[in-house]
Image: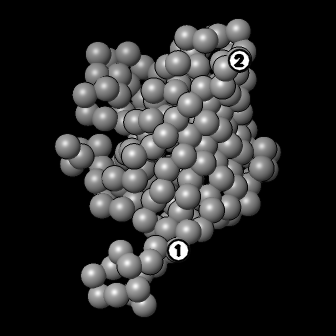
Amino acid sequence: MATVAITPDQNIITGEIFIAAPPARVFQAITDPEQMQRWWGASDMYRVTDSKADVRVGGKWSSDGVGVDGTRFHIDGEYLEVDPPRLLVYTWIADWTGSLKTIVRWELEPQSVHGLHPKGPERAGTGTLLRIRQEGFAGDPAAAASHSDGWQRVMGWLVAYVERGETIDTRR
């Protein structure tokens, strides 16, 4: 389960979760637009309908989607740091937050998975300790709270997709 917190000044959200998959696999799931459309969302909340990603420093990304009530949304930004499969940093501008521009940082740290494979530790693989940080909410505590709840869900969806292949349409 993900742990998510908001700093006392309500400027930064931090989150952390372990994923039983190598960093390269997790990095692929968070940067490949086709994969993101499969897992980022929930059938009873919203879904991403179109994503684009030019995953390089200075490259642009965007996601368009629709809420369960039919409300459309748009998010975009620019990649600031790209170091596969270890680090991804980009700006985040969501149309529902007005002019608020935040910075999202994904850190992927390899972790050994010992003893989790039924055929013994020699068959155990590599996992990933994922740390997320989104900064820039100063003066907007409601946006910080909303995004904090969102990251809790997103990290759970990512684990379900990468570890078990669950998508928006198959996840329970």
Q: Quadrant of the C terminus?
A: top left
> Where on the picture, by quarter, is residue 139?
top right
Q: Nearer the viewer, residue 41 or 105?
A: 105
Residue sitting at x 52%, y 35%: 4
Q: Is residue 62 above or below residue 94?
A: below
Q: Is residue 68 left or right of residue 96?
A: left
- Which mark, residue 24? none
Q: How far from the left and from the top, in percent, is residue 98?
A: 63, 11
The amino acid beneath tag 2 is: Asp
- Bin the neighbour count of mark 2 within 10 Å (Cα to Cα): few under 14, some 14-19, many 20 and up: few
Determine which residue is flagged by label 1.
Answer: 112
Residue sitting at x 40%, y 36%: 153
The amino acid beneath tag 1 is: Ser
Q: Is residue 58 above or below residue 125?
A: above
Q: Which element carries disc 2, helix, strand or loop?
A: loop
The residues tagged by marks 1 and 2 sit, at their Cα atoms, a distance apart of: 35 Å
Q: How far from the left and from the top, in percent, is residue 12?
A: 67, 27
Q: Is residue 83 above or below residue 91?
A: below
Residue sitting at x 45%, y 43%: 2
Q: Nearer the viewer, residue 104 or 131?
A: 131
Numbered-mark total: 2
Q: Is residue 131 left or right of residue 20?
A: right
- Is residue 49 something that shows in the picture? no
Determine which residue is flagged by label 2.
Answer: 9
> Where on the picture, by quarter, is residue 47?
top left
Q: Is residue 32 above or below residue 142?
A: below
Task: Pick whichever of labels 1 and 2 is earlier in the sequence.
Answer: 2
Q: How far from the left and from the top, in percent, is residue 87?
A: 69, 55
